Amino acid sequence: PRVPSMSPSPPPKLDLSLYLVTSSSLLPPGATLESHVEAAIKGGVTIVQLREKTLDTAPFIALGKRIHAVTQKYGVPLLINDRIDVAQAVGCEGAHIGWDDMDYDTARSLLGPTAIIGLSVSNLTQASLAASTSCNYLGIGPVFSTPTKPDASAAMYPSGVRQALELVSSKRPDLPSVIIGGIDSTNLQSVIYKSRPVSGKSIAGVAVVSAIISSTEPEIEASNLLSLFKSPPPWA
Ligand code: TZP
Ligand code: MG
């Protein structure tokens, strides 16, 4: 007979396949972020990051709570960009931080051992440092320069992504990575193919802002991006 286990069930595995990063300013006229995020999740988005660079603390928290109500309905994790205090106030699943934000160890001690914390990586030095933390995933990019983030670091291109993936998997083979920056349905498969590492793991997912946020059909767009991610490119 099965002996019932007293230990809590492990947290569900992190699915980074289609990672939506928000930017309310890029929504089509008349759209709300709540309805856009909900449609994108129905289309197949597996994780959401609230990235709202111009919001003050109180409206950022208020929006975070409204978006969290949506993501929780579908069991999709919500992360907050930059702001550990906002993530705590919203009570969401974690945060995504870069090198100008709070350091990883402090963020981890504030959010606790079960929070999801992702780190941005824009070059090989950052890839090496990030892989030496206990973070949950890396966001590698920008792959291409993009009007969504005009102040981003230099584009890495698929060749730079491949080097970062190889370095990361030599240090922390279990650490998943997503790529970001200028990715849409026209280039997704070629970017994945061209950045595939010689050894080690390929990317765990693709992160997009404008491809979904600026779309007037976010559900269809998300579904299309997810099926492109899941299917082998026609030339491979
Ligand atoms: N980090 C690196 S590029 C980028 C971020 C947040 C923006 C990506 O936006 P888009 O519209 O998907 O190119
Ligand atoms: Mg940041």
Image (tube, rainbow, N blue to C red):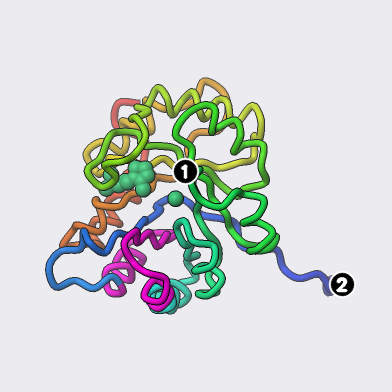
- For image coordinates 53% across by 70% down, the residue present is 92
Identify which amino acid the numbered label 1 is placed on: Gly
Identify which amino acid the numbered label 2 is placed on: Val
Estimate the x, y position of residue 174 in percent, counting from the top left: 64, 40
- For image coordinates 25% across by 43% down, the residue present is 184
Label of residue 139 in the image: 1
Estimate the x, y position of residue 30 in percent, counting from the top left: 14, 73
Horizontally, is 80 left or right of 216 in the view? right
Q: How many numbered discs sit on the rendered protein?
A: 2
Horizontally, is 127 left or right of 156 in the view? right
Q: Which residue in the protein does label 2 denote?
A: 3
Q: Is 55 colored magenta in this rendering?
A: yes
Secondary-structure class at tag 2: loop
Residue range in magenta is 34-62
User: Which badge, 2 or 1, comes first in the chain's sequence?
Assistant: 2
The answer to which of 152 and 182 lies nearer the viewer is 152
